Image (cartoon, rainbow, N blue to C red):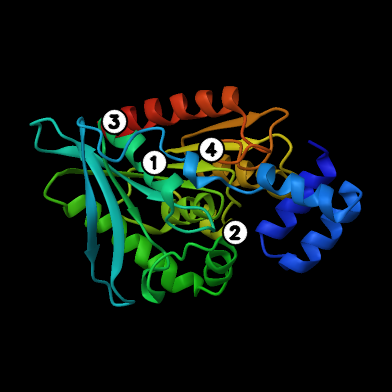
Amino acid sequence: MNRRVIELYDEYTHGRLDRRSFLVRLACLAGSAAAAAALLPFLENRYAQAATIAPDNPKLKTGRGRFDTPDGAVTYYIARPSSRLKKRPAVVVIHENRGLNAHIEDITRRLALAGFLAIAPDALSASGGTPADEDEARKRIGALDSEATLRRYVAAIRHAADHERSTGKVGCVGFCWGGSMAGRLAANSPDLAAAVVFYGMPPVADEALRIQVPLLLNYAGLDKRIDDAVPAFEATLKSAGVRYELYMYPNVDHAFHNDTNAARFNAAAAVLAWKRTVEFLTRELR
């Protein structure tokens, strides 16, 4: 797909364009409004295709839960292996700026199938949960108080550590907006043992200096918006003596792991990044 179209969509999905402006500019790039309409299904996420692992997979137990925080109650989706082994290392899954949707629930089940107790909190719990409309979800996430949201995720890590099915060892994995939050949790959660970042904006330098847990960092080679901040982040990690693995996947776009997005998904990079993620979490949490 035309790089300018991908970059335009990235501007739109990260809040720098409203939908009307995005569609007008997309029509200009595509040549007509009709051509732009034909492109949209390839650009937008198709959650009907999200379930690579069925919600009723007999190898898994899934459900919903909630926990209370001083900043309000948080609801979540949970998945774990259905085997008799009582306790598992836990992983908190942090969603993109579209909220807790079918794709993130599928990611949660993938982690459970890999042997973890996987918990995916909804950052929009306080406003009634993630809406079906993506634009509305992005709008609500953009309006969140960043520090209160961080505190809720710190509480989510603690909840995962204390869960009756948890060994007490907790990691996190975040995507895009959630990747940024995963980096912040690595600096702010005393209960976190490891963090995986998928193409999230690095934390500011003062916060990055406080990171003490091992990191796995997955970045997209064509994602200039994020990648420009990576060298300074890596220099900070080195100066702080943080143990980390950093992979820059060449010739792939932001959100290359999201298999509900035809325009940006890259199967080879996604499979490799996921393999590294599971191996990293298994090593660090067990």
* Amino acid found under the numbered disc labelled 1: Asp
Which tag is nearer the camera, tag 3 or tag 4?
3
Q: CA distance from mark 2 to mark 4?
A: 16 Å
The one nearer the camera, 10 or 272, is 10
Please name which of the two marks, 3 or 1, marks the residue nearer to the observer: 1
Neighbour tally class for label 2: few under 14, some 14-19, many 20 plus, Cα within 10 Å: some
Q: Position of residue 75 (x, y in %)?
A: 29, 63
Q: Earlier in the sequence, mark 3 or mark 2?
A: 3
What's the residue at 38%, 48% (across, down)?
93
Q: Residue at x 66, y 36 (%)?
A: 220
Q: Which residue is mark 2?
A: 204
Q: Could you tell which of marks 2 and 4 lies nearer the N-terminus?
A: 2
Q: Earlier in the sequence, mark 1 or mark 4?
A: 1
- Identify residue for label 4: 217
Please name the residue that numbered disc 1 is placed on. 106
Q: Quadrant of the N terminus?
A: top right
Number of marks present in the image shown: 4
- Report the mark closest to the observer, 1 or 4: 1
Q: Secondary structure at mark 3?
A: helix
The answer to whether marks 3 and 1 mark residues whose Cβ atoms lie closer than 8 Å is no
Which label sits in the foreground, 2 or 1? 1
The residue type indicated by label 2 comes to Val
Q: How far apart are the two marked residues, 3 and 4, measured between alpha carbons?
A: 22 Å
**196 shown above or below 68:** above
Q: Amino acid at mark 3?
A: Leu
What residue type is disc 4 on? Leu
